[in-house]
Each structure stands twice: as structure tokens, then as C-alpha cells.
Amino acid sequence: MDDLGGLERELRAAVRGGVDCSVTARALNTMDASNYRRVPLGVCTPADGDDVAAALEVCRRRGVPVVGRGGGTSIAGQATGTGLVLDFTRHMNGVVDLDPGTRTAVVQPGLVLDRLQAAAAPHGLRFGPDPSTHSRCTIGGMIGNNSCGSHSVAWGTTADSVAALDVVAGDGCAYRLGQGWDGAPAGLRELVERESATVRTGFAPYTGLPRRISGYAVDALLPEHGTDLARFLCGTEGTLGLVTEATVRLVEAPPAKALAVLAYADESAAAEAAAGLLPHGPLTVEGMAADLVPPDSGLPKGGAWLFVETGGATPAEARAAADRIVRSCDRATVVDALVVADPAGQRALWRIREDASGTATRMPDGSEAWPGWEDCAVPPARLGAYLRDFRGLLTEHGLRGTPYGHFGDGCIHVRIDFDLLTAPGIARFRRFSEDLATLVVAHGGSLSGEHGDGQARAELLPKMYGPALVGLFERVKAVWDPADLLNPGILVRPARLDENLRFAPLPREPVGPVDIAFGYPHDNGDFSAAVRRCVGVAKCRVQEPSSGGGVMCPSFRATGGDETHSTRGRARLLHEMLAGEVITDGWRSQEVRDALDLCLSCKGCRSDCPVGVDMATYKAEFLHHHYAGRRRPAAHYTMGWLPRWLRLVERTRTAGLVNSLTSVGVLAAAGKRVGGIARERRIPRVARQTFSAWWRAQLRRRVRERRFGPRGQKIAVLWPDTFTEHLAPEVGRAAVRVLEAAGVTALLPPRTRFTYRTEDGAPVAVGGNVLDPRRSRVCCGLTYLSTGQLDRAREVLKRTLDLMPSVVDADVPVIVLEPSCGAALRSDLPELLPDDPRARRLADRVVTFAEALERLAPDWAPPRLDRAAVGQTHCHQHAVLGDAADRRLRERAGLEGELSGGCCGLAGNFGFEDGHYDVSVACAEESLLPAVRSAGDGDVVLADGFSCRTQLEQLAGRRGRHIAEVLAEGLDGG
């Protein structure tokens, strides 16, 4: 459009909500969770229904298409468009009214499903449909796609749960839709009555199909079906009208639930059995195969599973119903079974199923897999036969995929390893799509069983309904939207299924525009493939803290749900940076830099994202290129070079002077202003004696006194990270004390490097004397990594490897007390130096303090403290290192209570940088600070990370302690 500025100005004048036609806004909305990409002109966030009508009026005059958008999790391309995107999640996202007596709720289209469930739960009610994206999908999107979810065998589809809809049609008219013809646009009744024979004939083959989502449900307008206009509009994918308010029906939620997990040899056996369970009245019958399940899942042994949920008035009643399901099974086909009545155990298993939409995007060998034929549905009794034919078709086309989904409804989800990057691969994608559509119809199925047709399947609807009924769909569209304003190219007169593919504009060079610094081992060294990991399932957009201890994505929540600051949003901008169409200045892009600026590098996405997006690494990569040959922000030189400055303080023995200067208000303020540090922050005090100096003094004393540990005592290397070394040496001292009590001798890494020559003259590097006072020392490079100074990080890490040949080559664990440093060594080190075999060997030696005790002193009993513990699992420990050993150690020590999830918000240099303070505080206020404020005076406040302890001290006035400090105090009877 030539007059983009004019469109923006006219929209701003017409609506009270937001209008944004910036590069960032357009780039964020080019894609949903499908294979498709369209570049919009701008984004409008309407404040109410009047804004929707006003925006449509402006767009109708200018001939600009309009697409409604909720959570952007559609997988068929229907949430993308080339005109104006109406994003309902910003303002139109509330529960208007909830009436427990009539079991109805009036809601706005941008309301996230979980928020409706939370509002209904105190009344013993819930909304029946619940897609796996329930924590971020919206009611408007569910209406548009006629979403279903795992409980559809009990409570049906969204169309079964909608009582009335307020809609603005493409012609600008507002309609109130319910049962009967009142509120219908002119000409619709006459059209349906005139074509009633075509409607009855066309839909007749699918009368008994529970998951018939494809096409327009024109049969809902027949008199024998109650002429239900609200039901008809469900599944029209925003092509006929935009919902501004919905009255939905709620169902009674069973007070108690149990989960029967039935194991089968393979998914075909599970599919054959699913229909036979329906007479028992289960709430769910979900199927999964082993390819999508982690090895430590806790599921019974088998190759595929059915998740069969039962309900009851009491836990015993729900458990009894699940036991009956197990007893009713054919013992010849069920390999094993498990009944889980514990709510926490059920949630853990359901997370495996819900993450499958992301997990399935990678094949077992790491290759990519994509949607496109994500949710075909057949009659449940035919599911087993259909799956066998489906597998045969995959083999015939040389493709792979792992089916899972709603077996009780005959609906299968699958991601397939289509090659959507090359012309031959795209041609095969089309041939397979045409053949699969034929196969689905042959089994009496629907091309879409949950997520709508969109662009992915609409072109093939004539195979299912025939040309006459599809032609009727077009005439229905003309009644509601005569100018074809709403979501053109979707469902009616659709674009080809192999057009507008999201990967088309990406560079074909494997590393993108320039050489990359990290190795990206899980993506074959391809930065573009790493960015492609984000397929849009949007788990990062969850607006409530995770009850399961998750982290991702703290900045999204702290900014009130701004997509720019979600993991998905940042991945979208990186994708568009590589594409070069919307974002045209590559690594120098200010839009990408601004979006990454509030990324805390918490690495939560690395573990919490179902497809393993690692935005912390992508951020470091971007900053490395963005500032190449240019002046960096002051904070990169102050906090990015922190190890260098602290070693300078140590060498000049000026810790006391530095502490005195930073305690003087005027001097501290000036230093923070020059150094790019937030004025609200207090500068941590530098220790007068470093941890290494203390350790060397202790060792010299023992040598003089000839006090040595017993022969055969276990040995470990204790890593002197920058924070423990210079800022919190008391943590290192406590760790040594506890390790010695457990029978482990802690040695520090060598500090010098020298070489000797073998008989053939080859130089061999070895570590020097641990007592040598020379300056060289090991470092994980964390501060250089977090600020994107990757050349410097690489130098530091190479020097570290040069210092540690004896450690790297020996089977000696390396204990790292600071979780961020441990994560850097375990993950960033081998990824930044992928060609150096020493990097992987050192990474494999890294253990946490709790892991070291468990491995080296399995029989040691820690002191019993028997106190409540509060705090937060460090985000890097959660994402990279794992905290299972820490949980076991706390349990053995009698430290009771669960640590909270999320991120403390300080995140190393992030919370100290100027401009980040408010977001840093908001992150801390989410989980950590409330948990600590509610703690009793005698409770232990645990915080293994220096950042977490600093945040607690500066914001809550509470001193957090490393687990080593707490145990050391316990050894002394404290």
C-alpha cells in the first residue's frame, strides 16, 4: 500500500485503542503457528466493539483486508493477513459477566481460556473445550476455529458451548446471533432455504462424525438443527464476521479426577482400543506414541499410551471409575496400565501431552517437522484402519511423522518432516496433501478436526464436500462480507496450499547473512534453522507464573503481555531480520536490538519451550554482530568486563578503597551514570580477601602442620567463579567446609600454564602449581557471553582450557557453586568452541554442589535442619543444570517446602543496567518476593545465585544464602 501513513493516521483518528504500523508491529504478526507467512500493513488493538466497527469502516473505504487475531496459535494460516491485524488480546480480554445459576458467562474475544477457567472454578464450573494451548489461546480464536481439546468426548466442541455471539460483519453491520433467524444478515435465510437440498446432501456423509470442523457449518441453519446462527458462525475463521462479545455455556467440573494411563505396543493398537472405552463415559481418551515421550516420563512401559481421565464427586469415586476403565480393557492388547489419582502427578503427565505440539516439531534424529496436516479426523471406530493407511502413505512419499491426539474422537495430530525449503520438497508437500485428503475422505473423515482449514486445507475442500457445496460456501461469504474484506484467501476462494510459505524469504546459505559465532549443534550449525525452531505454539505467552516451577518468559509477563518481549516475538523479529523484507538492515537492526534488550538471558525458554528455543544464545549472537566494529553501551564495558575489573582490584589490593568510594552517594551516582548502571541499584561490596587467597592460606597452613586428608579421600575441583571469588567468598568457604565433612577434598584449578616437550619434540601443555601466585586463572566467560562479546568470551574460554589439561583429561568432577557459571560451562562452552574436544570434556565434568555430594559422598548424611525453606530455583539451574539433586539434598537435610519458579529479575548484568530496573523489580515481584515476604523469621531463605541474593537484599531486605552456607551452619549446630 502506497499510503501506509495515511491509513495509520485515519485509524488513529477513528479508534480509541492502539494503532501501530511500525516495522516491529508488522514483523511480529507475519506468522501464526502454521507454515504460512503474510506481511500485514499494521496492527490495531481495539478497545471495544465500536472500535472494531470503526476500524472495519476505515479499511472498507481503503480496500484494506482485515484479519482478527487472538493468541496467534492457529496452525492452518488463518491468523495471518496482508492488511490490518485486529489484535483482541490487549484490551478486549475480560470476563464481562459470569452467572453460576444459568451456567453461562459473557466474555470478550481476547480472553485467554485459562482466565475464564479460573473465574468459573470457584463456582464448580468450567468451559468444556480445552485445547493444549489453553494457557494462551483466546475464546475468540476458539470460536473462529471451533476448537475442541482433550475433553471433547465429554463436553464437545466450542460450537457446542456457545449460546450467543455479538458480531460485526464485513459490511460493517452488527448482529446478535443466537437460535432462530433473528439477527441474520439479509439474504442468508433465503439462500439457505433455496439450497437446503444441497446442504442436506453435502453434509449427510458426516452426520455421525464428532470432529467435523471443515467448511462452513451451514447445516446448523437447517430447521431440524434449530437454525442456530451462533453455532454456524463457529469455525468460520474470521471470514464472515468478527466476534466482539460471546455468551458461552459452562459445564459442571467434576470435584475430583483420576487418570488411567493404558500402555499399548504401538499407536495403531491404542487407536483400535480407543472407541471401545467411550461407553464408560470418560472425560478424555488421548493417544500418544513413544517418539514424543521423554525417557523419564514415568509412564508405564509400552510403545504408545491412552490417557483416559475420569471424574467423580470424591477422589475415591474418580479412582474407582479409572480402575473400572483398566479392568474393562482387553488384556491381550494392553501391555501395562497405571492409575494416577494424585493431582500433581496428573498435571505432570498432562504436560507431556500438551507439549507434544512443540515436541513433535523435531524428529528423533533432530530433523525438522511441520504442521499442515495437523488434525484430520475420522469416525473413532475407523481410527486404527486410518492410521495404518496413513502410515503407508507417509512411507510411499518418503515422509515421517508421529501421530498423537484425540483418539476418542478419531482426531489425529501429526507433524511431518516436509522439506518446505526447496522446490522438490514443496512439490512433494502438495502431492502428499492431495493424496491424504483423498484418504481422509475415503474413511469418512474431515480434513480438519479441530484447528480449521485455513490455507493449509481449504483448497482441498471440494474433495470432501464437492463443488456444489463449496460453491454455496462462497455465496454465504458474499452475504456476510460482500467486499471480501475479512480474511480473504482463507477457507473460501483460498490461496494455494503451497503459497505464502513462511520459509520462502529466508536466505538459503546455511549460516545466514554472515558467519556465526556459536556452533548450534542441535541445528547442524545453521542459525536460520535455530530461529526456525519457533513454530508459534506460544507457551512463552503464558501470563500467569507457572505452577510447575517454570521460568519462560519473565519479560513478557513483566511488560503486561507485550508480544515484542516474548520468546516468540523475538524469534519472529530474528526470522524477519534474516528474511530481509520487513526488517532490512540485518544484524544492525534497531528493532531486533530493542526487542532483545529486555531479554533477561534467563535461558528459561531453553527448557520450557517445547521446541527448545534458546533466546539467550540468539541474543548473544545478535549482540556480537550488532556491535561488531562499533562502540558498545557503557554497561558492556563495566559489567561485561567485571572479571577483569575485579582482578585489578585484587592485584592492587584496593577493595577497601573501592567499597568506600561506592558508599559515597555523589561518587556512586556519578560512577553509575558513567558506567550505564541503574541509579536505583547499590553496588555490591568487594571482598577484602578473595576465596582463592583464603583457600591457598588454608592449604599452606595444612602443609606446614602436615594435616592431610585420609588416604583414598575423594577429590574434586572447586571452580572459583568471579562472584564467589570476589563478592561472596563466604559461599566458597562454606562449600569447602561441607565437602570436607562429607570426605571430599576440594582443590582449585591451576592458575598457570607451562609446557614441556616429549621425546619427539611435541609441546604438551600442563597445569601449574596451585600455590603459584601468578595472575592467570580460569573463567567461564559468563559476563562476556551475556553482553555478546563473543570474541572475548572465546579467548577467555580457550585460556581456561589451556590451564586445565590435567583436570579435563582426568575423571575429576568440577564443582561450580554459581548456577549461571555452571550453565555457561555446561552449555555455552561447547557451543562456542565446537571444534575443541576439550570443551566438551570440561562441560561433561561440571556438577552442581548437590550433584557433587550425591556422586562423591552418597552415604554421607547432611545435618538435619528441620526448617521451612523459601526462595527460588535459579533460572539457569532450572533450564540447564537441573535441580533434582538439590531437591533430594534439601529433603535429606530436612529443609521443607517448594522453591518458587520464575526469575529473580536481576539476571546478572540485566537488572543493573540503566533502563531495566522496573522490569527487574516486576519479575522479582511475580514469585520470589511474595514467597520471601510470607516466610517466617525462622525460615531459611535459599538462593544459590549471587544475582538472586543481591536482588533479595536490595528489594526485600532479606539475606538469601547458598545451600552450602546453610549446611555449613548446620554442621556447627546452628
Image: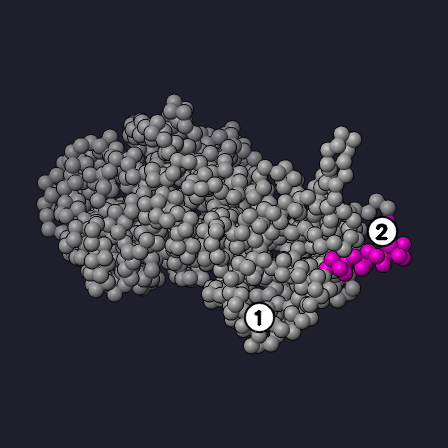
Residue 557's label in the rendered image is none
Q: Mark 2 sits on what residue? A: 709
Estimate how packed mark 2 is, as few (under 14), some (14 to 19) or many (20 or more) residues with alpha carbons within 10 Å. Answer: few
Please tell me which residue is depicted at 9% across the width and 45% down the height of the picture. 190
- Asked whether, in this view, residue 349 is left or right of residue 479, the answer is right
**Tally of numbered discs:** 2
Viewer-closest of 374 and 663: 663
- Asked whether, in this view, residue 624 is left or right of residue 704, the answer is left
| Residue 75 position by quadrant | top left
The amino acid type of the residue labelled 2 equals: Gly
| Residue 693 position by quadrant | bottom right
Name the quadrant of the C terminus: bottom right
The alpha-carbon separation of the residues under discs 1 and 2 comes to 42 Å
List x then y, in percent, for residue 44: 27, 57
Prevalent SS, magenta region: helix
The amino acid type of the residue labelled 1 equals: Arg
Please tell me which residue is depicted at 44% across the width and 59% down the height of the picture. 557
Please tell me which residue is depicted at 31% across the width and 64% down the height of the picture. 97
What element does badge 2 sit on? loop
Indicate yes or no whether the magenta region holds residue 926: no
Q: Mark 1 sits on what residue? A: 682
List x then y, in percent, for residue 368: 44, 35
Q: Which residues are magenta?
A: 691-710
